[in-house]
Image (tube, rainbow, N blue to C red):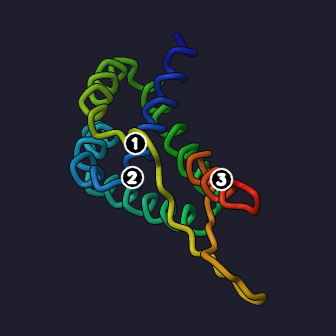
Amino acid sequence: MEAELTALAASGATAFVGLMATEAWNQARGRVARFLARGEDSEAVDAELEESREELIAARRSGDEDGAADVTAEWRVRIRRALRDNPEAADELRGLLDELAPLQPTGTTVSITNNTISGGHYNGPVLMAQTIHDGVHGAARRQGPGTP
């Protein structure tokens, strides 16, 4: 049972932190705060969630993946403790995760990165990307000398 609650806590933390960096967070934040407060002061938990959100966004903007992972780890521990102290909360968390599932980001995730190119002389556009699919890259290759 402990392993199941640990896995559920990890799923909850991943979902909550994943939503923090999206516009859907405004819709989810209140429900998440009420769940985490467990009948206590949800405004205090809401403030903690907002602080975590700011830390997450700052970490992602600076490329600090460890900092972003720390935010998830912090909430995973808190959720696991809440589930350990109140095992009945597991069903409530599963229900909340089901409700929040449509708000979860899907597809491509875009992170904001500021890059600067300096020095040298460039005779064409400079592309910076994690992946350039063959359709774009291949078109440039075919324009070489002796290519029809």
At 44% from the left and 65% from the top, the residue drawn is: 54
Residue indicated by mark 3: 148
Residue indicated by mark 1: 16
Q: Nearer the viewer, residue 107 or 71?
A: 107
Looking at the picture, which amino acid does disc 1 mark? Phe
Tell which circle, 1 or 3, labels the residue nearer the N-terminal end: 1
> How far is disc 1 from disc 3 in space, using C-alphas?
53 Å
45 displayed left or right of 82: left
At 37% from the left and 20% from the top, the residue drawn is: 90
Tell me the crowding category of disc 3: few under 14, some 14 to 19, or many 20 or more residues within 10 angstroms, Cα based. Answer: few
Q: Nearer the viewer, residue 144 or 104?
A: 144
Residue 61, located in which quarter of the rendered image? bottom right
40 displayed left or right of 139: left
At 54% from the left and 45% from the top, the residue drawn is: 72
At 48% from the left and 38% from the top, the residue drawn is: 14
Tell which circle, 3 or 2, labels the residue nearer the N-terminal end: 2
Which tag is nearer the camera, tag 1 or tag 3?
3
Provide residue 10's location: percent of width, then percent of height.
52, 31
Provide residue 123's location: percent of width, then percent of height.
68, 82
Looking at the picture, which amino acid does disc 3 mark? Pro
> How far is disc 3 from disc 2 in space, using C-alphas?
50 Å
Provide residue 28's location: percent of width, then percent of height.
26, 45
Q: Secondary structure at mark 1?
A: helix
Residue indicated by mark 2: 20
Which tag is nearer the camera, tag 3 or tag 2?
3
In this view, 106 is above or below 22: above
Instruction: Check if mark 1's residue and mark 2's residue have beta carbons within 8 Å.
Output: yes
Q: Nearer the viewer, residue 39 or 107?
A: 107
Looking at the picture, which amino acid does disc 2 mark? Met
Tell me the crowding category of disc 2: few under 14, some 14 to 19, or many 20 or more residues within 10 angstroms, Cα based. Answer: many
> How far is disc 1 from disc 2 in space, using C-alphas?
6 Å
Instruction: Check if mark 1's residue and mark 3's residue have beta carbons within 8 Å.
Output: no
